[in-house]
Image: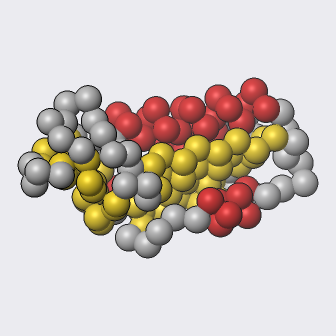
Amino acid sequence: MPAVRLAAISAEPLSLDAHLAAVDDASAGAVTTFVGRVRDHDPDAATRVVALEYSAHPDAEAALRRIAEAAAGDTGAIVAVSHRVGRLGVGDAAVVIAVASAHRAVAFEVCRAVIETIKTELPVWKRQIEADGTSTWLGLGG
């Protein structure tokens, strides 16, 4: 069974349940999850954040799979990860990660490695839209 069971860039809403189902395995004694959501504020925003618009390079899905594979390495962890594209409102899930492993320490470590690497290496960009209509483009990562 592959270490990465799901790695997707999606315009559709992300389902935590689908990610949990993807990593379901009798060998796993631990499952960790991470859900990155759109929040209503940003330290650099002058007004309230009302939406984020994500766009991705055509190779982003392959890059996401490589990120997940590298994080899992030879740990035996099982990973499911997705990143949204398109316009997301406050509260919408932008990133969902589920990691299953025999022990909790590995599950936490792999999950953290996936999100931290997404933030620095995944070719996804976001435009942050504020309540006053101001928008700002932000670089790599979600």
Q: Position of residue 112 (x, y in %)?
A: 57, 32
| Residue occupying the point 18% across, 52% down | 131
In the rendered structure, the answer to whether residue 84 lies left or right of residue 4 reads left
Q: Where is residue 60 in the image (x, y as percent from the top left)?
A: 35, 56
Q: In which quarter of the image is the C terminus?
A: top left
Q: Where is residue 45 in the image (x, y as percent from the top left)?
A: 19, 36
In the rendered structure, the answer to whether residue 59 lies left or right of residue 35 reads left
| Residue occupying the point 73% across, 64% down | 21
| Residue occupying the point 40% across, 60% down | 84
Total residue callouts: 0
Q: In which quarter of the image is the N terminus?
A: bottom right
Q: Where is residue 107 in the image (x, y as percent from the top left)?
A: 71, 36
The answer to whether any part of residue 56 appears in the image is no
In the rendered structure, the answer to whether residue 90 lies left or right of residue 127 reads right
The answer to whether any part of residue 31 appears in the image is yes
Determine whether 87 is above or below 105 in the image. Answer: below
Q: Which of 39 and 126 is in front in this view?
A: 39
| Residue occupying the point 18% across, 41% down | 47
Determine whether 130 is above or below 7 in the image. Answer: above
User: Which quadrant holds residue 33?
Assistant: top right
In the rendered structure, the answer to whether residue 68 lies left or right of residue 9 reads right
Q: How did the renderer colour the structure?
A: secondary structure
Q: Which residue lies furthest to the bottom in this view?
A: 12
Q: Which of 87 and 68 is in front in this view?
A: 87
